Amino acid sequence: MNLEELEQIAESVRFEQAKFDQQVNVCMGTGCLSQHSDQLKDALAEAAEKSGKKVHVRRTGCMGLCAAGPLVLVEPDQTMYQHVGAEHAEKVVASLGGEPLAELQCELADHFDDQVRVVLENSGQIDPEKIDEYIARDGYKALVTVLTEMEPGGVIKLITDSGLRGRGGGGYPTGLKWGTVAKAVGDIKYVICNGDEGDPGAFMDRSVLESDPQRVLEGMAIAAYAVGASKGYIYVRAEYPLAVQRFQACLRDARRRGLLGSNICNTQFNFDVEIRLGAGAFVCGEETALIASIEGRRGTPKPRPPYPAVSGLWGKPTLINNVETFANIAPIMRKGAAWFSSLGSARSKGTKVFALTGKIKNTGLVEVPMGMSLRQIIEGIGGGVPDGRKFKAVQTGGPSGGCIPDELLDLGISYDALIGAGSMMGSGGMIVMDDTSCMVNVARFFIEFCMTESCGKCIPCRAGTAQMFTLLDRICKGAGTMADLELLVDLCATVKETSLCGLGMSAPNPVLSTLRFFRHEYIEHIVNKRCPAGVCAIHAPAAVPTTEEVPA
């Protein structure tokens, strides 16, 4: 395979598409499929055939606006329809070439205007199970160029210069990690894609794998060339059957096109990938636990160093990045480091994909440049809080993150800014809460999650999260005291400083952030035996605080 052959494939796809007057794209991501978009696609194809019109009905991945699904996008006029059912198929086809159907037209489509789609540029635009459609949109040009024109060191330098940081939560510089693996000594090296997305309310990686799997694979192959790896694994949780199915098809088609396997692009570079399914343990998102799981052992973390970059899978140098990180690689190689670093903020370059969920009008997937304010994302793109309720907080970073209040809504999203606010970027979950949410109860929910998901290997996490949950549960039920609150704060510090892995170290964040910004709610529960939001079932009478219990 070379650039000329890629262009021939792309030209063939464009030739076939030119036979049709309209392309009707039907979202068949998990969200829309749950609302029978597969039946909608079949009905549209049948209606198109009966009409005699030159219409191509195409399966695509996630279009982003999950709240309005099932979604249909008509090209080339870019008309988007929402909440479309199989019963609407004939009307949609009849309207093609004429006036759009006002009753189905998506009024929220312009919320995409503020987005910058790098990772999601093909999502909703191509059939995720047809490699040729990916190639027609510049797919694999980066890999072919890298293998035939660049040295591994040049690839690493370009990624370093771009300023790309890992999108899995920690924000570690990608180029620095690649350089470490490249310098490590080993007869074999591995590349692992971490698709173990376990945060409540997060579905970014799942959507990318369902919508544009070839993009992730191309990124993995470029990384493998750069660090000297010949074998790759993608670790995906078994709860993502559609993502697994489409990645399997992706691997099959890439091998058929000579873009995976031996002597790729007629070079000495060999690289192949296998899928490994996770059983759903949240802790397996931690890289050493993930490695243990791939090796067939119980998924528990181990102390570092040595780091996986030096001694990882089966004791060999191993590069681990998440789905979104790999999805950024091909566009960076095509468009250059300067282009990517021009997006975002000073220390957080590029874009970030977020899953907007919770009490927000436009639930779905968004991609925005780093540095955009939380207010622009939540109120501008997300449409704000529904039903006339008042915004209260947004949880970023999943159970490892924190709750950010209204007074910090103008904060620009970046790794450093979110940490400064007591939260973190995480993998990209963003859960919006309104004034009906009790922040003590929210903290209890996330601590319960961490307690349940703790692997139990280290005592601070195993016992600490359990004791934190007991204290929070007591406060929520109106039985807590100010002494319990002091003990809770002490426990947070102990668990944070002494846990073995990131799960335990970050588990106290929701408690610490709610104590920082919503301490008055804890006081109301403890002193006045009242839940301000009316969520917690407190039946005990208000107690008269002792001298020691009067808050400062």
Image (cartoon, rainbow, N blue to C red):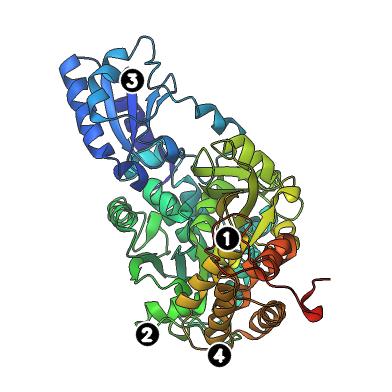
Query: Which dot, 2 or 1, sits closer to the camera?
Result: 2
- How far apart are the alpha carbons under marks 3 and 2? 51 Å
- How far apart are the alpha carbons under marks 1 and 4? 47 Å
Which SS class for mark 2?
loop
Amino acid type, residue under disc 4 in the picture:
Ile
Residue ranking furthest to the right: 552
Q: Nearest the camera: 115 or 512? A: 512
Numbered disc total: 4
From the image, tell me which residue sits under label 3.
22
Which SS class for mark 3?
strand
Query: Which dot, 2 or 4, sits closer to the camera?
Result: 4
Q: Is residue 343 visible?
A: no
Query: Dot 2: within a 10 Å radius of its alpha carbon, few (fewer than 14), some, or many (20 or more) residues?
Result: few
| Disc 3 and disc 2 in contact, CB within 8 angstroms | no
The residue positioned 50% from the left and 77% from the top of the image is 451
Q: Nearest the camera: 426 or 243? A: 426
The location of residue 518, given as percent across then percent down, is 70, 60
Q: Nearest the camera: 340 or 262? A: 340
The residue positioned 50% from the left and 39% from the top of the image is 121
Query: Dot 3: within a 10 Å radius of its alpha carbon, few (fewer than 14), some, or many (20 or more) residues?
Result: many
Q: Nearest the camera: 235 or 184? A: 235
Amino acid type, residue under disc 3 in the picture:
Gln
From the image, tell me which residue sits under label 2.
297
- How far apart are the alpha carbons under marks 2 and 1? 36 Å
Query: Which dot, 3 or 4, sits closer to the camera?
Result: 4
From the image, tell me which residue sits under label 4.
459
